[in-house]
Structures are given as structure tokens and as C-alpha cells.
Amino acid sequence: MSGTARPNDQIPRRNAQRFVCPHCNTLAKQDWFPLFYIPEANAKHQELNTHAGQAGVSRCHYCTKMAMWLGIQMVFPQGSTAPLPVADMPEDVKALYMEARNVFDLSARGAGGLLRLAFTKLFPHLGVNKDDPNRAIAELVKVGLAPDIQQQALDLMRVLSNQTVHEGFVSEGDQPATVLFLFWLLNYIVEQMISKRKQIQTAYASLPQDKREAIAKRDAVK
């Protein structure tokens, strides 16, 4: 996923005229075909979903591959429209991120709650042992976190991930796009605060030893 969250009209939805195909990841027109109808399922869930009990198929105009739907839920392919985690995401954070990714298309709110937990797991990897994200960010600011893009990204993640799991703060229609932005934002934070730091450390370690020793001697002078 690139720099902005996917708009609502790109997320796969039952009977949508176009969305991002789960096979080719292209925003494309979709054709729809009914398969069969299960009266019992519709009777049980009709108050929740006008398509309950209805199986259908969507076919992508770009790649011509098909997706299968039962009610409003895409049941094949069993992928996710959320982005994959970046390479340097710590394993305990990644485990929650992947769990959120797996449930995103079934429950954006559930994914938002898991991303909130993943966010709190990130702080020890940034050198801060605080359970409360607000206090953790304050600690990072004290030790030199620049009050610009990185701090804004952390506070965005803190506020939005909290709001997605509380009734009324984010409307149901905006939930998927908001949570997709959280996936992107958590990846961005890892890239900015872990990946780039590793890149600089690796580059610094490649300097000749005499240059590093001269820098250390300079920094030792009071």
C-alpha cells in the first residue's frame, strides 16, 4: 500500500461496480453472477444483511479471475485487502498485525483493536517501557523525539486506533478506510523509527575504524 489509505470505493464489497481485485490488486470493474440461495440463512440473518443466504460470484474485468461471496462476505480468495507488514517489524508486533490483517475484511473494528495492541507492543522496541501509549510518546519526546512527522505519526496512531474500537467515534461507513490507514501508519512508524535507524547504523559501521575512533575521541571531549 502506498502513501494514503484505500478509499471506500476501492474496498471489495458485495455488488459494488468496481473495487481493487483481490487477485491482481487492480482497481477494476466487476461483473456479478448469482449462484444459489439459502432460505434458512436468509431468514436467520435478514435483519442484518439483505444478501444473507445469497451466494454469488464477482469477475474482474482486468484479470478475469473470480471471487466467491456468501452474503456480504467474500469467502474466496481467503486473502486480505490490508497491506503486508514491513520487513523490520518486530515479531511480537507482527503477530498481532497479521492477526488484524486476517480479520480485516470480516471486521474492520476487530482489526482496529488488534492494531491498537500491536502499537503498544512496539514501544519497548523503541526503548520505552510504558503500557500507556500517551505516556510512552511523552517519554520519547523527552529523550529527543522530534516534534514533527514521527511524533505526529505516533499520536495519529494512538488517537485513531483508540477511536476505531469505541462506538460512535468512527462511523461504520468510514471504519474500513480508517483502519486501512492504521495499517499503513504502523508500517510507516516502523520504517521511520526502526528501519532507517538500522540503515544508518549499518552505514556508520562500514566507516573505516580510524574514522570511527576519531569520532569517538571527539565526542569524549567535554
Image (tube, grey):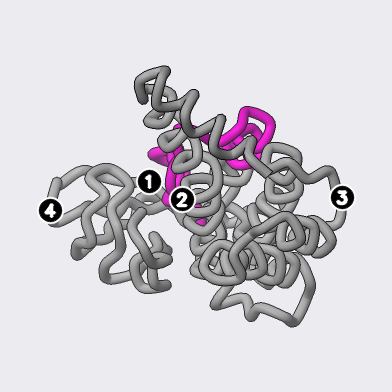
The residue under label 4 is 62
- Please report whichever mark, 4 or 2, sits nearer to the chain's N-terminal start: 4
The residue under label 1 is 68
- Mark 4 surroundings within 10 Å by alpha-carbon count, few (fewer than 14), some (14 through 19), many (20 or more): some
The numbered dot on residue 131 is 3
Observer-side mark, 3 or 1, equals: 3
Q: Residue at x 42, y 72 (%)?
A: 8
Give the alpha-carbon distance from disc 2 to disc 3, as whole Å. Answer: 26 Å
Q: Is residue 32 left or right of residue 205?
A: left
Q: Is residue 151 left or right of residue 141?
A: left
The residue under label 2 is 82
Q: Amino acid at mark 2?
A: Ala
Magenta stretch, residue numbers: 71-99
Q: Position of residue 121 (x, y in %)?
A: 74, 42
Report helix, strand or loop for mark 3. Answer: loop
- Please report whichever mark, 3 or 4, sits nearer to the chain's N-terminal start: 4
